Image (cartoon, grey):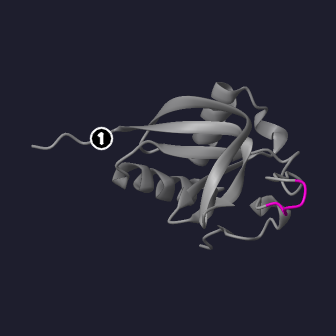
């Protein structure tokens, strides 16, 4: 009989920005802090928020967004249904998945340039690009 996985291990990261690098979206560290979380597979959105808030020392009421890269699309984890989809993604993945924190104070204003004459590749320049929410 197969053992059923009851917990998942994820990496959480704050202090970066989503950028397009060689055509792929990557969470690029600015002043990045990374931590590992082990969560119950059947976690709720409030449980995930509390765990991330505690582990990364972020005020849960600060309005931060939880995001991850799924097939080169940035997914915003914003409710119990999205947490369930995220956990399925983690279980199917052959590597540790990173949940990236986008803090509301920098959302929409975070810029990253690779040179003074080049434009930014940050998706936060146009917050709606490649970010989607599944409607129920």
Task: Identify the image quadrant of the C terminus.
Answer: bottom right
The stretch in magenta equals 116-120
Q: Position of residue 119 (x, y in %)?
A: 85, 63
Residue positioned 73% across, 71% down in the render:
129
Q: Nearer the viewer, residue 104 or 95?
A: 95
Horizontal side, residue 64 vs residue 7: left or right? right
The correct choice, above or below, for 93 with respect to 55 in the image is: below
| Residue under the point 89% across and 60% down | 117
Q: Is residue 123 above or below residue 33?
A: below
Please tell me which residue is depicted at 42% across the width and 49% down the height of the picture: 90
Report whether 42 appears left or right of 14. left
Quadrant assignment for the N terminus: top left
Q: Is residue 70 left or right of residue 94?
A: right
Question: Residue 58 lies in magenta, yes or no?
Answer: no
Residue under circle 1? 5
- For the stretch drawn in magenta, what is the main secondary structure? loop
Q: Residue furthest bottom?
A: 135
Check disc 1: other Cα within 10 Å, few if <14, some if 14-19, many if 20+: few
């Amino acid at each position: 009989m197969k053992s059923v996985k009851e917990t998942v291990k994820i990496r959480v990261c704050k202090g970066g920005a989503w950028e397009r690098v060689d055509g792929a979206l990557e969470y690029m560290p600015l002043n990045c802090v990374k931590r590992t979380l082990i969560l119950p597979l059947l976690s709720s959105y409030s449980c995930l928020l509390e765990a991330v808030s505690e582990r990364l020392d972020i005020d849960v009421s600060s309005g931060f967004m939880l995001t991850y890269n799924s097939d080169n699309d940035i997914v915003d984890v914003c409710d119990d249904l999205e947490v369930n989809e995220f956990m399925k993604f983690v279980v199917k993945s052959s590597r540790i998945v990173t949940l990236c924190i986008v803090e509301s104070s920098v959302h929409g204003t975070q810029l990253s340039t690779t040179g003074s004459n080049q434009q930014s590749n940050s998706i936060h320049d146009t917050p709606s690009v490649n970010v989607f929410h599944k409607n129920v």
